[in-house]
C-alpha cells in the first residue's frame, strides 16, 4: 500500500482550486504532474552546475557531464537494461519510435516485407512505420482486438510469416488501458526472425519494466508521463542492433571524427544524441525515476488497479447511461478508463466535468483507428497515477450523476470542435 496523503504533499499543483472545486487531476495518460523533487533537481542543475556536456575540461562541464551520464545510468537501472549506453535520450516516445523506424527500417526493410501494427496503437506508433513502409515498399498490416478489448493473439499468430520483419505494439493501450502480454508478443516476433518494438509510453510509468526479461528489441517512453519534464524521452535498444545503425539526426556530438570526405560515428549512446541535449530535462527524469523507485512500481500498479476496479464499480452503478470501453477484468488493465455518456458528446461531458474541477481528456486520444473500431468517434478518458484517490473517484461519479440528470439541457449545448491534435 502506498501512502497517498504523503505523496500528495510533494505535488503543490494538487492543492489548486479549479472552478471553485479542489482540482481532481485525471489526465495522467496525457501528461502527469511533477513532484517538488523533480522541479528542485532541475533548478539545482541550472543554479549550480549548468554547462554544456562532453565539450570542456572545466569543472562545470565535467560536473554537468557526470550528472548527465549518471542520469542515463539511473534510467538504465529502472528498466533493467544491460548497460547505461543503450539508453538514448530523445524528446519523447514519438521521437523514439521515429528513430527506431527510420534507422532500422530504412536499413533493413525490403519491398514485400511486412510490419505488423495493432488496431489499438497510438498514432505515434502507426504513422512512422507507415511512412517507412511507403519509402521501402514494405506492407503494414494491423492486428485486430477482440470485442472485449484484448489484443487478438490468434489473429496475430495467423498473420506471422517469413515476410514479417517488425511487430510494433503498445505495451498498454492509452484508451482501453489493456496491458498486452509483452513476452508473448516478443516471442512471436522472434519466432519468425522479426524485431519487437515496444511502445512503452503508458506502461513504463505505471508498471515494472524489465527489458532483459521481456526481451523486446526497442522500447520507447516519455519522461512527462512519469513525473519527469516535458521534452525528454528514452529509446532503449539492443546493443547489437544499435551498433549497426547510423544516426537518425547527425551533427555535433554524434561523431568521433570528421574529415571533408568521411565520418566516424561516435559510440553509443552519443551517436544518436545529436547536438546539445536536454541536459536539465534528463537530470529531471532521473530524479523522477528515483521518486518512482522509492514508492515502488509494483505498489503503484496495485494502487492504480484498485482505483480502476473502484471506478468500474462506480460507473456500473450509473447504469445504462454510461458506456465503458475495454476489458472488465482489471488484472489485464492499468488505470485508464474510457467511456461515453449516452446521448452526450464527449467534449460536452469533459467541459461539464471541468466545472466540477475534474480534468479528463476527451476526443480521439491520438488513437482514431481504435475509436472507429469501437464504432465511435471519441470518448472521455479518466487516467490515474500514484497521487489519485478513491475519494476523487467518488466525486467524479457524483459529478457524472449530475451531468446525466442534466442531460436534456446539456445535449442542446453547442459542441466546440477543439482540435486536440489527436
Ligand atoms: C501509447 C502511447 N504511445 C505514444 C504516445 C506519444 O507520447 P509523446 O506525445 O510523449 O511522444 C502516447 C501519448 O499519449 C501514448 O499514450
Image (spheres, rainbow, N blue to C red):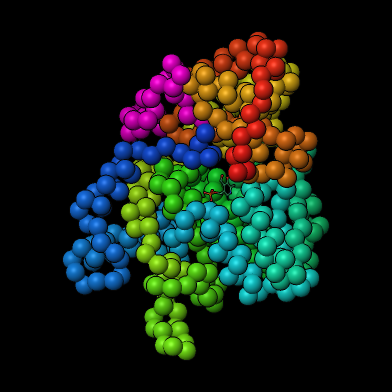
Identify the residue shown where x is 43% and y is 53%. Answer: 232
Magenta range is 1-26
Quadrant of residue 399 within the rendered picture: top right
359 lies above or below 116: above
Q: Position of residue 210 (x, y in %)?
A: 50, 55
411 lies above or below 162: above
Q: Position of residue 167 (x, y in %)?
A: 68, 60
User: In the orientation shown, which residue stands out farthest toward the top?
Assistant: 405
Residue 83 can be seen, yes or no: no
Identify the residue shown where x is 55% and y is 45%. Answer: 202
Count of number-bearing discs: 0
418 lies above or below 64: above
Identify the residue shown where x is 66% and y is 19%. Answer: 413
User: In the orientation shown, which residue stands out farthest toward the left?
Assistant: 59
Q: Quadrant of the C terminus?
A: top right
Q: Position of residue 421 (x, y in %)?
A: 60, 44
Asked whether 85 or 248 is in front, the reply is 248
**Residue 7 part of the magenta segment:** yes
**Residue 244 appears left or right of 269:** right
Quadrant of residue 49 within the rendered picture: bottom left
**Residue 178 part of the magenta segment:** no
Q: Quadrant of the N terminus?
A: top left
Quadrant of residue 50 within the rendered picture: bottom left
Identify the residue shown where x is 64% and y is 21%. Answer: 315
Residue 396 can be seen, yes or no: yes
**Residue 252 appears left or right of 200:** left
216 lies above or below 243: above
Q: Position of residue 56 (x, y in %)?
A: 24, 71
**Residue 135 appears left or right of 269:** right
Amino acid at each position: 500500500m502506498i501512502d497517498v496523503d504523503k505523496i500528495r504533499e510533494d505535488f503543490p499543483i494538487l492543492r489548486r482550486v479549479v472552478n471553485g472545486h479542489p482540482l481532481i487531476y485525471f489526465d495522467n495518460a496525457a501528461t502527469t504532474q511533477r513532484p517538488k523533487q523533480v522541479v528542485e533537481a532541475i533548478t539545482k542543475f541550472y543554479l549550480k552546475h549548468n554547462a554544456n556536456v562532453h565539450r570542456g575540461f572545466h569543472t562545470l562541464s565535467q560536473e554537468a557531464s557526470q550528472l548527465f551520464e549518471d542520469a542515463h545510468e539511473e534510467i538504465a537501472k529502472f528498466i533493467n537494461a544491460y548497460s547505461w549506453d543503450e539508453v538514448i535520450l530523445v524528446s519523447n516516445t514519438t521521437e523514439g519510435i521515429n528513430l527506431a523506424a527510420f534507422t532500422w527500417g530504412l536499413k533493413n526493410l525490403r519491398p514485400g516485407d511486412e510490419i505488423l501494427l495493432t488496431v489499438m496503437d497510438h498514432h505515434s506508433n502507426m504513422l512512422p512505420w507507415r511512412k517507412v513502409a511507403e519509402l521501402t515498399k514494405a506492407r503494414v498490416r494491423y492486428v485486430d482486438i477482440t470485442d472485449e478489448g484484448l489484443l487478438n493473439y490468434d489473429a496475430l499468430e495467423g498473420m506471422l510469416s517469413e515476410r514479417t520483419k517488425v511487430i510494433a505494439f503498445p505495451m498498454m493501450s492509452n484508451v482501453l488501458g489493456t496491458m498486452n502480454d509483452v513476452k508473448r508478443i516478443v516471442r512471436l516476433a522472434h519466432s519468425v526472425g522479426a524485431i519487437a518494438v515496444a511502445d512503452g509510453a503508458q506502461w513504463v510509468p505505471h508498471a515494472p519494466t524489465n527489458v532483459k526479461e521481456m526481451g523486446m528489441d526497442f522500447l520507447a517512453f516519455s519522461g512527462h508521463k512519469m513525473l519527469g519534464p516535458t521534452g525528454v524521452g528514452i529509446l532503449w535498444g539492443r546493443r547489437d542492433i544499435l551498433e549497426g545503425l547510423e544516426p537518425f539526426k547527425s551533427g555535433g556530438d554524434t561523431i568521433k571524427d570528421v574529415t571533408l570526405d568521411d565520418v566516424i560515428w561516435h559510440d553509443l549512446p552519443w551517436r544518436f544524441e545529436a547536438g546539445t541535449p536536454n541536459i536539465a530535462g534528463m537530470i529531471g527524469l532521473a530524479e523522477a525515476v528515483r521518486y518512482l523507485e522509492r514508492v515502488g512500481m509494483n505498489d503503484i500498479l496495485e494502487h492504480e488497479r484498485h482505483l480502476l476496479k473502484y471506478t468500474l464499480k462506480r460507473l456500473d452503478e450509473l447504469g445504462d447511461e454510461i458506456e465503458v470501453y475495454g476489458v472488465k477484468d482489471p488484472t489485464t488493465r492499468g488505470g485508464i478508463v474510457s467511456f461515453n455518456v449516452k446521448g452526450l458528446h464527449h467534449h460536452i461531458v469533459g467541459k461539464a466535468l471541468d466545472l466540477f474541477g475534474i480534468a479528463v481528456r476527451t476526443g480521439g486520444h491520438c488513437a482514431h483507428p481504435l475509436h472507429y473500431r469501437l464504432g465511435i468517434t471519441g470518448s472521455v478518458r479518466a487516467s490515474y497515477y500514484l497521487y489519485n484517490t478513491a475519494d476523487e473517484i467518488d466525486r467524479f461519479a457524483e459529478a457524472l450523476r449530475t451531468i446525466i440528470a442534466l442531460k436534456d439541457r446539456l445535449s442542446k449545448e453547442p459542441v466546440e470542435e477543439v482540435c486536440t491534435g489527436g
